[in-house]
Amino acid sequence: MRTTIRDFQKMRVENQPIAMVTAYDAMSAQVAEAAGVHGVLVGDSVGMVVQGQDTPIPVRLEHIIYHASIVVRLTQAPLVVGDMPFLTYNISPEQAIANAGRLLQEGGVGAIKLEGGEFLAPTIRRMVETGIPVMAHIGLMPQSVHKMGGMRVQGKDLDTARQLLRDAVAVEEAGAFAVVLEGVPAPLGQLITERLHIPTIGIGAGPHCSGQIQVFHDLFGLLEGHMPKHAKLYAQLGTLMREGMAAYVHEVQTREFPTQENSFTMKDDVLTALRANGADGRADR
Ligand code: KIV
């Protein structure tokens, strides 16, 4: 049975930490599933970690649908959440409902995530009334990177911290089943978590959130020279992969690879007959 948004709520009530990670393809989906994560986000971070973009802004709805359908097919247990890309939900509630509908129908996800607080609450309310489970995302909102002047920690002063509290309460009252808190000071993450009834899922929001989410590639050092402060390296696979790839290239060049072990055989008599006719087979014609 797949984890549902009711399970998320139950875990919040029972104070059981929720573990989420992003996934985009068969490999990340299978690794996440095997580890027993509760939720998988097909995030618009796909723009950076898969497409090699600088920001998530170029990501399109079709990209998330494509990656979500893979992740849904390759997992059985976690709740799969599809991220709504830039400008696919901010124009009108009708636009948001239509595009979220595509993520549910074509991508197969069980919920969607969108970036925005108080100002987006009316849209969230309409989506939830329509039957779409919504995970909100406040604090550092990567789709607003240009407005923020970079990927910066949010809510450090009194005014912005108060606004974040208002944002959190507004999305809960609008019916969001959970809220991602990204890039906020740990004490503010704690305050928001204490104030809300729905789970907070933190990324760079301290240890007191109801759960945590991380970008798959950050956990394993898959992208050279990229390690955000909020992430922890659980295995340095990127270095291992680069060393392995260099060894492969070297062995191809020195003819150490492939060996007999990596090769297929054929019957001697077939080979003898083939050789007798000339290696290019022309004697057969
Ligand atoms: O797109 C993403 O990966 C996200 C997480 C960082 C929360 O939004």
Image (cartoon, rainbow, N blue to C red):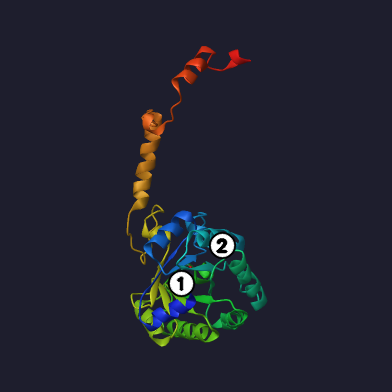
Residue type pointed to by label 2: Ile
What is the distance, in whole Å, between disc 1 and disc 2 at their CAs? 20 Å
Residue 14 x %, y % = 36, 82
User: As displayed, is residue 139 above or below residue 65?
Assistant: below
Label 2 neighbourhood size at 10 Å, few (<14), some (14-19), many (20+)? many
Q: Secondary structure at mark 1?
A: loop
Question: Mark 1 = which residue?
Answer: 3
Q: Is residue 119 left or right of residue 242?
A: right
Residue 58 x %, y % = 58, 60
Q: Are marks 1 and 2 in contact (CB under 8 Å)?
A: no
Q: Which residue occupies the foreground of this view, 278 or 85? A: 278
Q: Secondary structure at mark 2?
A: helix
Q: Is residue 177 left or right of residue 284?
A: left
Label 1 neighbourhood size at 10 Å, few (<14), some (14-19), many (20+)? some
Question: Mark 2 = which residue?
Answer: 64
Q: Is residue 6 left or right of residue 206?
A: right
User: As displayed, is residue 92 above or below residue 174?
Assistant: above
